[in-house]
Image (cartoon, rainbow, N blue to C red):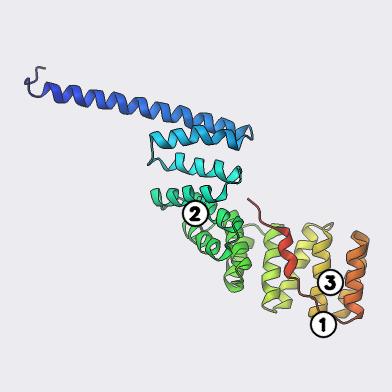
Protein backbone atom coordinates (compact mmCIF):
# COMPACT_ATOMS: atom_id res chain seq x y z
CA UNK A 1 0.00 0.00 0.00
CA UNK A 2 1.23 3.46 -0.89
CA UNK A 3 0.48 6.41 1.43
CA UNK A 4 0.30 10.10 0.46
CA UNK A 5 3.58 11.85 1.20
CA UNK A 6 1.95 14.03 3.91
CA UNK A 7 0.94 10.89 5.89
CA UNK A 8 4.35 9.24 5.89
CA UNK A 9 5.97 11.50 8.56
CA UNK A 10 3.01 10.89 10.89
CA UNK A 11 3.36 7.13 10.48
CA UNK A 12 7.08 7.30 11.18
CA UNK A 13 6.47 9.47 14.28
CA UNK A 14 3.82 7.07 15.59
CA UNK A 15 6.17 4.12 15.05
CA UNK A 16 9.01 5.86 16.89
CA UNK A 17 6.74 6.74 19.81
CA UNK A 18 5.43 3.16 19.98
CA UNK A 19 8.95 1.72 19.99
CA UNK A 20 10.02 4.21 22.66
CA UNK A 21 6.97 3.42 24.82
CA UNK A 22 7.62 -0.31 24.51
CA UNK A 23 11.25 0.21 25.49
CA UNK A 24 10.21 2.23 28.56
CA UNK A 25 7.67 -0.43 29.53
CA UNK A 26 10.30 -3.17 29.23
CA UNK A 27 12.81 -1.19 31.31
CA UNK A 28 10.22 -0.52 34.02
CA UNK A 29 9.20 -4.18 34.09
CA UNK A 30 12.82 -5.31 34.45
CA UNK A 31 13.39 -2.84 37.29
CA UNK A 32 10.18 -3.97 39.00
CA UNK A 33 11.27 -7.61 38.81
CA UNK A 34 14.63 -6.66 40.31
CA UNK A 35 12.83 -4.98 43.21
CA UNK A 36 10.64 -8.03 43.76
CA UNK A 37 13.76 -10.18 43.90
CA UNK A 38 15.31 -7.90 46.50
CA UNK A 39 12.17 -8.08 48.62
CA UNK A 40 12.18 -11.85 48.31
CA UNK A 41 15.73 -11.85 49.66
CA UNK A 42 14.59 -9.77 52.65
CA UNK A 43 16.40 -6.67 51.41
CA UNK A 44 13.69 -4.00 51.60
CA UNK A 45 16.23 -1.18 51.50
CA UNK A 46 17.78 -2.64 48.36
CA UNK A 47 14.35 -2.93 46.72
CA UNK A 48 13.67 0.79 47.03
CA UNK A 49 16.01 1.89 44.21
CA UNK A 50 14.68 -0.40 41.43
CA UNK A 51 11.07 0.19 42.47
CA UNK A 52 11.70 3.97 42.49
CA UNK A 53 13.15 3.84 38.98
CA UNK A 54 10.25 1.70 37.72
CA UNK A 55 7.70 4.12 39.24
CA UNK A 56 9.57 7.08 37.73
CA UNK A 57 9.35 5.51 34.28
CA UNK A 58 5.65 4.69 34.70
CA UNK A 59 4.29 7.06 37.39
CA UNK A 60 0.68 5.98 36.81
CA UNK A 61 1.39 2.28 37.29
CA UNK A 62 -0.33 1.52 40.60
CA UNK A 63 1.50 -1.76 41.06
CA UNK A 64 4.89 -0.04 40.91
CA UNK A 65 3.79 2.73 43.30
CA UNK A 66 2.27 0.20 45.70
CA UNK A 67 5.42 -1.96 45.66
CA UNK A 68 7.61 1.06 46.34
CA UNK A 69 5.38 1.96 49.28
CA UNK A 70 5.63 -1.58 50.59
CA UNK A 71 9.43 -1.50 50.36
CA UNK A 72 9.50 1.74 52.37
CA UNK A 73 7.09 0.18 54.89
CA UNK A 74 9.32 -2.86 55.35
CA UNK A 75 12.34 -0.53 55.63
CA UNK A 76 10.43 1.30 58.41
CA UNK A 77 10.22 4.63 56.58
CA UNK A 78 6.57 5.06 57.50
CA UNK A 79 5.99 8.69 56.37
CA UNK A 80 7.28 7.88 52.88
CA UNK A 81 5.25 4.67 52.80
CA UNK A 82 2.13 6.63 53.75
CA UNK A 83 2.63 9.06 50.85
CA UNK A 84 3.01 6.25 48.36
CA UNK A 85 0.06 4.20 49.59
CA UNK A 86 -2.16 7.31 49.47
CA UNK A 87 -1.01 7.78 45.88
CA UNK A 88 -1.70 4.10 45.11
CA UNK A 89 -5.28 4.38 46.45
CA UNK A 90 -5.89 7.37 44.19
CA UNK A 91 -4.47 5.59 41.15
CA UNK A 92 -6.67 2.56 41.82
CA UNK A 93 -9.50 3.26 44.29
CA UNK A 94 -10.78 -0.32 43.98
CA UNK A 95 -7.55 -1.90 45.32
CA UNK A 96 -8.34 -3.23 48.80
CA UNK A 97 -4.69 -4.18 49.36
CA UNK A 98 -3.55 -0.57 48.99
CA UNK A 99 -6.10 0.58 51.56
CA UNK A 100 -5.13 -2.29 53.86
CA UNK A 101 -1.44 -1.34 53.73
CA UNK A 102 -2.25 2.35 54.19
CA UNK A 103 -4.26 1.39 57.27
CA UNK A 104 -1.30 -0.62 58.60
CA UNK A 105 1.00 2.38 58.15
CA UNK A 106 -1.43 4.75 59.89
CA UNK A 107 -1.78 2.26 62.76
CA UNK A 108 2.01 1.99 63.09
CA UNK A 109 2.23 5.81 63.11
CA UNK A 110 -0.07 5.90 66.15
CA UNK A 111 -3.17 7.16 64.33
CA UNK A 112 -5.72 4.41 65.06
CA UNK A 113 -8.82 6.49 64.25
CA UNK A 114 -7.53 7.18 60.72
CA UNK A 115 -6.47 3.55 60.44
CA UNK A 116 -9.97 2.45 61.46
CA UNK A 117 -11.51 4.56 58.68
CA UNK A 118 -8.99 3.34 56.12
CA UNK A 119 -9.41 -0.32 57.02
CA UNK A 120 -13.17 0.23 56.84
CA UNK A 121 -12.75 1.22 53.20
CA UNK A 122 -10.70 -1.93 52.63
CA UNK A 123 -13.46 -4.02 54.23
CA UNK A 124 -16.05 -2.46 51.92
CA UNK A 125 -13.90 -3.49 48.96
CA UNK A 126 -13.14 -7.00 50.29
CA UNK A 127 -15.89 -7.84 52.82
CA UNK A 128 -14.84 -11.47 53.39
CA UNK A 129 -11.07 -11.07 53.68
CA UNK A 130 -10.24 -12.37 57.20
CA UNK A 131 -6.98 -10.45 57.73
CA UNK A 132 -8.56 -7.15 56.69
CA UNK A 133 -11.51 -7.77 59.03
CA UNK A 134 -9.08 -8.45 61.86
CA UNK A 135 -7.04 -5.35 61.04
CA UNK A 136 -10.16 -3.19 60.93
CA UNK A 137 -11.36 -4.59 64.25
CA UNK A 138 -8.00 -4.08 65.91
CA UNK A 139 -7.66 -0.49 64.68
CA UNK A 140 -11.22 0.44 65.68
CA UNK A 141 -10.64 -1.21 69.07
CA UNK A 142 -7.50 0.89 69.59
CA UNK A 143 -9.48 3.99 68.59
CA UNK A 144 -12.01 2.99 71.30
CA UNK A 145 -14.75 2.50 68.73
CA UNK A 146 -15.71 -0.74 70.38
CA UNK A 147 -19.11 -1.23 68.76
CA UNK A 148 -17.55 -0.88 65.30
CA UNK A 149 -14.66 -3.15 66.31
CA UNK A 150 -17.07 -5.84 67.49
CA UNK A 151 -18.95 -5.71 64.18
CA UNK A 152 -15.76 -6.33 62.17
CA UNK A 153 -14.37 -8.95 64.53
CA UNK A 154 -17.63 -10.88 64.66
CA UNK A 155 -17.51 -11.05 60.86
CA UNK A 156 -13.89 -12.14 61.08
CA UNK A 157 -14.88 -14.86 63.52
CA UNK A 158 -17.49 -16.15 61.07
CA UNK A 159 -14.86 -16.42 58.34
CA UNK A 160 -12.22 -17.97 60.61
CA UNK A 161 -13.56 -19.13 64.00
CA UNK A 162 -10.14 -20.45 65.06
CA UNK A 163 -8.29 -17.12 64.75
CA UNK A 164 -6.70 -16.59 68.17
CA UNK A 165 -6.17 -12.84 67.73
CA UNK A 166 -9.72 -12.19 66.56
CA UNK A 167 -11.01 -13.91 69.70
CA UNK A 168 -8.68 -11.91 71.98
CA UNK A 169 -9.50 -8.54 70.41
CA UNK A 170 -13.19 -9.37 70.33
CA UNK A 171 -13.16 -10.36 73.99
CA UNK A 172 -11.35 -7.17 74.91
CA UNK A 173 -13.83 -5.03 72.97
CA UNK A 174 -16.76 -6.70 74.72
CA UNK A 175 -15.07 -6.22 78.10
CA UNK A 176 -14.69 -2.48 77.50
CA UNK A 177 -18.45 -2.30 76.96
CA UNK A 178 -18.88 -4.24 80.22
CA UNK A 179 -20.44 -7.10 78.31
CA UNK A 180 -18.60 -9.62 80.46
CA UNK A 181 -20.59 -12.71 79.45
CA UNK A 182 -19.65 -12.22 75.78
CA UNK A 183 -16.08 -11.30 76.70
CA UNK A 184 -15.66 -14.47 78.74
CA UNK A 185 -16.88 -16.64 75.85
CA UNK A 186 -14.24 -15.15 73.56
CA UNK A 187 -11.40 -15.44 76.08
CA UNK A 188 -12.39 -19.01 76.95
CA UNK A 189 -12.14 -19.86 73.24
CA UNK A 190 -8.82 -18.02 72.93
CA UNK A 191 -7.51 -19.93 75.95
CA UNK A 192 -8.42 -23.22 74.28
CA UNK A 193 -6.79 -22.16 71.02
CA UNK A 194 -3.57 -21.23 72.82
CA UNK A 195 -3.61 -22.84 76.27
CA UNK A 196 0.01 -21.96 77.05
CA UNK A 197 -0.44 -18.18 76.69
CA UNK A 198 -0.39 -16.95 80.31
CA UNK A 199 -1.74 -13.46 79.59
CA UNK A 200 -4.94 -14.81 78.08
CA UNK A 201 -5.44 -17.19 81.01
CA UNK A 202 -4.79 -14.31 83.41
CA UNK A 203 -7.26 -11.96 81.68
CA UNK A 204 -9.85 -14.71 81.67
CA UNK A 205 -9.50 -15.00 85.44
CA UNK A 206 -9.85 -11.22 85.76
CA UNK A 207 -13.01 -11.32 83.66
CA UNK A 208 -14.51 -14.02 85.85
CA UNK A 209 -13.86 -11.71 88.76
CA UNK A 210 -15.38 -8.71 86.97
CA UNK A 211 -18.46 -10.86 86.25
CA UNK A 212 -18.59 -11.69 89.98
CA UNK A 213 -17.92 -15.38 89.44
CA UNK A 214 -15.32 -15.70 92.19
CA UNK A 215 -15.29 -19.51 92.19
CA UNK A 216 -14.39 -19.59 88.47
CA UNK A 217 -11.72 -16.98 89.09
CA UNK A 218 -10.20 -19.11 91.85
CA UNK A 219 -10.09 -22.16 89.58
CA UNK A 220 -8.56 -20.05 86.82
CA UNK A 221 -5.91 -18.69 89.17
CA UNK A 222 -4.52 -22.17 89.65
CA UNK A 223 -4.11 -22.58 85.88
CA UNK A 224 -2.39 -19.21 85.60
CA UNK A 225 -0.01 -20.03 88.43
CA UNK A 226 1.22 -23.12 86.58
CA UNK A 227 2.04 -21.05 83.50
CA UNK A 228 3.43 -17.89 85.11
CA UNK A 229 4.03 -17.62 88.84
CA UNK A 230 4.05 -13.81 88.91
CA UNK A 231 0.75 -13.54 87.03
CA UNK A 232 -0.70 -16.26 89.23
CA UNK A 233 0.28 -14.27 92.31
CA UNK A 234 -1.18 -11.10 90.82
CA UNK A 235 -4.51 -12.78 90.10
CA UNK A 236 -4.48 -14.30 93.61
CA UNK A 237 -4.19 -10.80 95.12
CA UNK A 238 -6.97 -9.52 92.89
CA UNK A 239 -9.28 -12.35 93.89
CA UNK A 240 -8.77 -12.15 97.61
CA UNK A 241 -8.55 -8.38 97.62
CA UNK A 242 -11.80 -8.20 95.62
CA UNK A 243 -10.10 -5.86 93.14
CA UNK A 244 -11.64 -5.70 89.66
CA UNK A 245 -9.02 -5.42 86.96
CA UNK A 246 -9.05 -3.29 83.83
CA UNK A 247 -7.61 -5.41 81.03
CA UNK A 248 -6.57 -2.43 78.89
CA UNK A 249 -3.06 -3.80 78.38
CA UNK A 250 -4.47 -6.57 76.19
CA UNK A 251 -3.01 -4.42 73.40
CA UNK A 252 0.32 -5.95 74.35
CA UNK A 253 -0.55 -8.62 71.80
CA UNK A 254 0.07 -5.95 69.17
CA UNK A 255 -0.69 -5.78 65.48
CA UNK A 256 -0.03 -8.35 62.80
CA UNK A 257 0.91 -7.58 59.22
- The 10 Å Cα crowd at callout 2, few under 14, some 14 to 19, many 20 or more, is many
In this rendering, position of residue 95 left or right of residue 38: left
The first of marks 1 and 3 along the sequence is 3
In this orientation, which residue lies closer to the viewer: 43 or 26?
Answer: 43
How many marks are shown on the rendered structure? 3
In this rendering, position of residue 251 left or right of residue 72: right
Say above or below: 39 vs 184: above
Locate residue 73, reporting x and y percent: 57, 46
SS at badge 3 = helix
Report how far apart the C-alphas of labels 3 and 2 lie in the structure. 37 Å
Q: Write down the quadrant of residue 21 in the picture.
A: top left
Which tag is nearer the camera, tag 1 or tag 2?
Answer: 2
In this rendering, position of residue 149 left or right of residue 211: left
Report how far apart the C-alphas of labels 1 and 2 lie in the structure. 42 Å
Q: Residue furthest top?
A: 2
The first of marks 3 and 2 along the sequence is 2
Locate residue 62, reporting x and y percent: 42, 43
The reply to whether discs 3 and 2 touch (Cβ–Cβ < 8 Å) is no
SS at badge 1 = loop
Report how far apart the C-alphas of labels 1 and 3 lie in the structure. 11 Å
The reply to whether discs 1 and 3 touch (Cβ–Cβ < 8 Å) is no
Q: Which residue is mark 3?
A: 205
Q: Which residue is rendered at x = 41% and y = 36% of the image? A: 56
Locate residue 67, reporting x and y percent: 50, 41
Q: Which residue is mark 2?
A: 99
* Label placed on residue 32: none
The reply to whether discs 1 and 2 touch (Cβ–Cβ < 8 Å) is no
SS at badge 2 = helix
- The 10 Å Cα crowd at callout 1, few under 14, some 14 to 19, many 20 or more, is some
The first of marks 1 and 2 along the sequence is 2
Which tag is nearer the camera, tag 3 or tag 2?
Answer: 2
Amino acid sequence: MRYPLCVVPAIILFTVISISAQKTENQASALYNAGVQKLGEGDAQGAIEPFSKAAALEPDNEQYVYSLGFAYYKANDLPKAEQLFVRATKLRPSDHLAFNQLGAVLFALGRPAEACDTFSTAVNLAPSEPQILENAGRACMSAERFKQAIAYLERGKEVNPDDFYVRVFLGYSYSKRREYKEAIVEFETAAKLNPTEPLVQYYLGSLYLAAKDKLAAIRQQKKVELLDASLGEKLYREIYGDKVVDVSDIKAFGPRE
